[in-house]
Image (cartoon, helix red, strand yellow):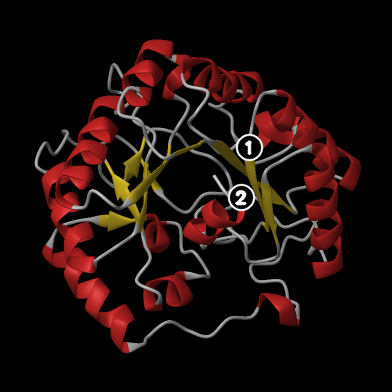
């Protein structure tokens, strides 16, 4: 596997530095509302593109995660208390931005009994109070397998329920030591059982050490557990302290994975080097004709 800090990026992974007018305006807006975005915390390469489109993925429940996944740039440690005013500020910001589609995610909060499900629900309800036409997608942690917490969230009826599996079964525990491959699949399946009308979605990164056959097997596992929408993107190492990149997949390989996924029966597959779970999520939703 590649071990240098910054292996030479192929041309298809190079993107312009963010910095347009709308980007700067949104940054000021986020700071003023004391909101976090996964775009910044996870150092997403698409931040410039998304923010210029007035699209952002809001990260609730603080910026400190209780887990330490070896591919992730989000700060880990002991989180602070829950900010009960966050759902209101988030809803007002969504209204000010005039969003038609909103994605909400969070850090893992294993210190909370429900993993933060109640705050997710509040965010959905407050957004709909201010922006009734705005679709709300939630990208949730596994809630440590707490079915009661998931039921609480499902009652708020998000338009899409997203939970990322991230990687293949063989290397899952190596890169996600506190996660569980089976538990994540079961969460997606239970979501469908609780409300069959809520589309389920998941994402995987490739380039962590898996082979092509393992990617396909992971896709099959997701489809078997009722996953409707799928995103597949290239893993990019945040720093030398993180898991090394094993391979840069070519655009043609992503095209092949998309074809395979559609043949499996996914309603939509977004696959490409720079695809991320919430990248152009509104377009994914429309393309799936949900």
Taking the spot 37% from the left edge, 62% from the top edge, the residue there is: 56
Image quarter of residue 139? top left
Secondary structure beneath dot 1 equals loop
Along the line of sight, the residue nearer the viewer: 125 or 115: 125
**For discs 2 and 1, the disc positioned in front in the rendered view:** 2
Secondary structure beneath dot 2 equals loop
Mark linked to residue 288: 2
Task: Give the mark, 2 or 1, whose residue is nearer the N terminus.
Answer: 1
Q: Is residue 216 left or right of residue 20?
A: right
Image quarter of residue 211? top right
Image location (x, y in percent) of residue 239 = 55, 61
Quadrant in which the C terminus is drawn: top right
Image location (x, y in percent) of residue 78 = 29, 34
Taking the spot 50% from the left edge, 54% from the top edge, the residue there is: 278
Quadrant in which the N terminus is drawn: bottom right
Would residue 244 be seen by someone viewing this image from the given angle? yes
Along the line of sight, the residue nearer the viewer: 80 or 90: 90
Which residue is situated farthest in the left direction here?
85
Would residue 241 be seen by someone viewing this image from the given angle? no
Rendered position, 80 above or below 7: above
């Amino acid at each position: 596997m590649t071990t240098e800090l910054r292996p030479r990026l192929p041309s298809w992974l190079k993107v312009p530095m963010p910095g347009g007018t709308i980007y700067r305006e949104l940054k000021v807006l986020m700071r003023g509302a004391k909101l976090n975005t996964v775009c910044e915390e996870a150092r997403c390469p698409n931040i410039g593109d998304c923010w210029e489109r007035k699209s952002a993925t809001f990260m609730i429940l603080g910026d400190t995660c209780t887990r330490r996944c070896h591919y992730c740039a989000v700060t880990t440690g002991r989180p602070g208390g829950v900010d009960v005013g966050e759902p209101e500020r988030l809803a007002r910001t969504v209204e000010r931005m005039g969003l038609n589609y909103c994605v909400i995610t969070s850090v893992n909060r294993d210190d909370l009994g429900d993993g933060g499900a109640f705050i997710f629900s509040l965010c959905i309800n407050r957004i709909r109070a201010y922006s009734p036409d705005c679709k709300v997608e939630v990208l949730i942690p596994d809630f440590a397998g707490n079915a009661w917490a998931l039921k609480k969230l499902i009652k708020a009826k998000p338009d899409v329920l997203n939970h990322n599996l991230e990687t293949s079964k063989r290397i899952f525990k190596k890169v996600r030591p506190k996660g569980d491959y089976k538990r994540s699949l079961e969460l997606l399946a239970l979501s469908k059982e609780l409300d069959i009308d809520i589309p389920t979605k998941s994402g995987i990164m490739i380039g962590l050490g898996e082979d092509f056959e393992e990617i396909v097997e992971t896709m099959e596992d997701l489809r078997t557990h009722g996953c409707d929408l799928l995103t597949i993107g290239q893993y990019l190492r945040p720093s030398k302290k993180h898991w090394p990149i094993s391979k840069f997949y070519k655009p043609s390989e992503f095209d092949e994975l998309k074809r395979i996924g559609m043949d499996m029966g996914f309603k939509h597959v977004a696959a490409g080097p720079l695809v991320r779970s919430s990248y152009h999520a509104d377009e994914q939703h429309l393309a799936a004709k949900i």
